[in-house]
Amino acid sequence: MRQAVSSARPAPPPAPCSTGSMHALVASPYKSAYNAAKHGVAGFTKTLALELSQKNITCNAICPGAGGGCDSVSGFMCACA
């Protein structure tokens, strides 16, 4: 038991991830409340990343959007702070 405990690796730091949308990066007409909320998600994630970077903690936002279809990686954009 002692050997197992002594050889255990420390846990990696947490990496919070929030969910936005393409509207966190680019606005579109007639969706002002939605756009504002998603811009808030992006801003919050960027601010959190700056605050936690001194502790070696990364924060990311996944922002899915319209693209080349369900099987296409290009159908997703990622805003990483």
Image: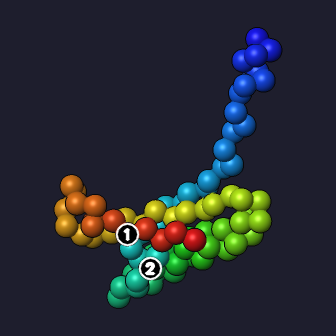
Q: Nearer the viewer, residue 23 or 73?
A: 73
Specify the quadrant that holds the N terminus.
top right
* Image-quadrant location for residue 18: bottom right
- The answer to whether 27 appears left or right of 15 in the picture is left
Q: Nearer the viewer, residue 51 or 66?
A: 51
Name the residue at 27% across, 67% down: 74
Residue 72 is at least partly visible in this image: yes
- Mark carried by residue 77: 1
x, y percent for residue 63: 42, 67
View extreme (bottom): residue? 29
User: CA gap, disc 1 to disc 2?
Assistant: 9 Å
- Mark carried by residue 25: 2
- The answer to whether residue 78 is above or below residue 1 is below
Name the residue at 44% across, 79% down: 25
Disc 2 residue crowd, few under 14, some 14–19, many 20+, Cα 10 Å:
some
Specify the quadrant that holds the C terminus.
bottom right
x, y percent for residue 6: 78, 23
- Under mark 1, the amino acid is Met
- The answer to whether 34 appears left or right of 74 in the picture is right
* Image-quadrant location for residue 69: bottom left
Name the residue at 73% across, 64% down: 52
- The answer to whether residue 42 is above or below residue 2 is below
Contact between marks 1 and 2 (CB within 8 A): the answer is yes
* Image-quadrant location for residue 34: bottom left
Disc 1 residue crowd, few under 14, some 14–19, many 20+, Cα 10 Å:
some
- Under mark 2, the amino acid is Leu
